[in-house]
Amino acid sequence: MNIDDVKNIAVIGAGNMGHQISLLSAIRGYKVVCTDVSEEILKKAEKFADTYLPGRVEKQKLTAEEAKAARQRISFTNDMEQAVKDADYVIEAVIEVLDVKRKLFAALDKIAPKHAILATNSSTFVSSLIADATSRPSKVVNLHFFNPALVMKLVEVVKGPHVSDETADSSFKLCERLDKVPVLIQKEVEGFLLNRIFKVISQEALWMLDMGVASAEDIDKACVFGAGHPMGPFRLMDLTGIDLSYTISMGKFRQTGDPTDRPSPSVVEKFIKGHYGEKTKKGWYDYTDK
Ligand SMILES: NC(=O)c1ccc[n+]([C@@H]2O[C@H](COP(=O)([O-])OP(=O)(O)OC[C@H]3O[C@@H](n4cnc5c(N)ncnc54)[C@H](O)[C@@H]3O)[C@@H](O)[C@H]2O)c1
């Protein structure tokens, strides 16, 4: 499908990533329907839109008319069929569990228009693990946004062997129209591009923490003030979710049995306590007052 034919976007999952991808798409002129299985999460996403847009007007990043038009372009529903029935491009941002994604894509394949591209925002699963659950593998692609999706410019477009040139091209151009900086990853590799680099940094940071070499705060400070990173690995994990780090490492460990893939003891401890980071107000840092 040609990028000019993409008018309607459906976002599945209104959590950390989905609510911001939805809003971003609405701000950039697309008609968006955002859906989630959780009423509570949908309400939160809608409330966020109602707070964020006036905030952008106050900061003079959007005019009042632009904010109003963006708000009118986005809607929220827990009815997935309703959400995707007119979609030209579907972006999935549900929990990072392969079986959940495969079942979801099989369902999407049945209810989304035949021409629609089905993209996954998965951080780890290459789309060939999902594409065969549908009857349109050439239209199933990875579109990997970074957190927070409204802010971070990079999007990784992964062109697996089943992905058509047209799907990759439209996905790449969609990112540009969303004012992002897409990069094309031409081979399916686990973790894609940037997270492979970050994995090395965060593994080393966690090892130093577990060995008592330095505190999380000091490791973060070293990365910020010594390497010029905008934030250190622990602050980043709080933002992306320690539960996500745990799920990814545990999934990998179950798959390989390699002890070096196991989540680090301090990550396991945070996970068990339910200290997932900003979203639970506690992680490596305390956000109770924020
Ligand atoms: N958190 C990050 O920093 C980050 C960054 C890039 C990519 N991702 C990827 O984005 C995806 C979402 O991550 P997140 O952090 O937003 O997760 P999240 O847990 O914040 O949100 C996931 C949402 O999906 C909903 N959901 C679960 N099953 C569903 C279904 N069948 N249909 C509709 N909604 C369903 C849940 O109710 C939840 O609101 C994951 O694949 C993750 O790997 C996350």
Image (tube, rainbow, N blue to C red):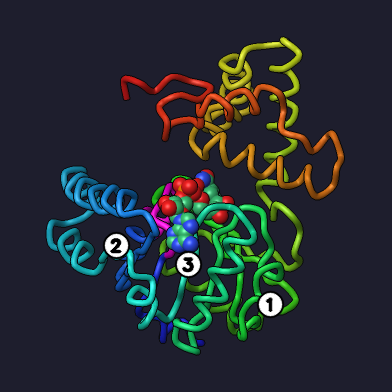
Mark 3, Cα crowd under 10 Å, few <14 / some 14-19 / many 20+, is many
Please give the name of the residue rendered at 76% of the width and 59% of the height, measured from the top-left corner.
189
The image shows residue 140 at horizontal and vertical percentages of 60, 75
Task: Say which residue label 1 marks.
Answer: 132
Please give the name of the residue rendered at 65% of the width and 28% of the height, measured from the top-left corner.
268
The answer to whether 153 appears left or right of 37 in the picture is: right
Front-most of residues 39 and 52: 39
Q: In the rendered image, is residue 152 in sight? A: no
Point out the frontmost of discs 2 and 1: 1
Point out the frontmost of discs 1 and 3: 1
Please give the name of the residue rendered at 46% of the width and 81% of the height, measured from the top-left corner.
3
The image shows residue 132 at horizontal and vertical percentages of 68, 77
Mark 2, Cα crowd under 10 Å, few <14 / some 14-19 / many 20+, is many
Front-most of residues 147 and 120: 120
Q: Is residue 17 magenta?
A: yes
**Mark 2 residue type:** Ile
Task: Say which residue label 3 marks.
Answer: 91
Task: Say which residue label 2 marks.
Answer: 27
Q: CA distance from mark 2 to mark 3?
A: 16 Å
The answer to whether 60 appears left or right of 92 in the picture is: left
Q: Is residue 171 magenta?
A: no
**Mark 3 residue type:** Ile
The secondary element bearing badge 3 is classed as strand
Q: CA distance from mark 1 to mark 3?
A: 17 Å
The answer to whether 5 appears left or right of 165 in the picture is: left
Q: CA distance from mark 2 to mark 1?
A: 33 Å
Front-most of residues 87 and 80: 80
Compare marks 1 and 3 and give the one earlier in the sequence.
3
Where are the magenta residues, as a range?
12-21
Above or below residue 273? Residue 36 is below
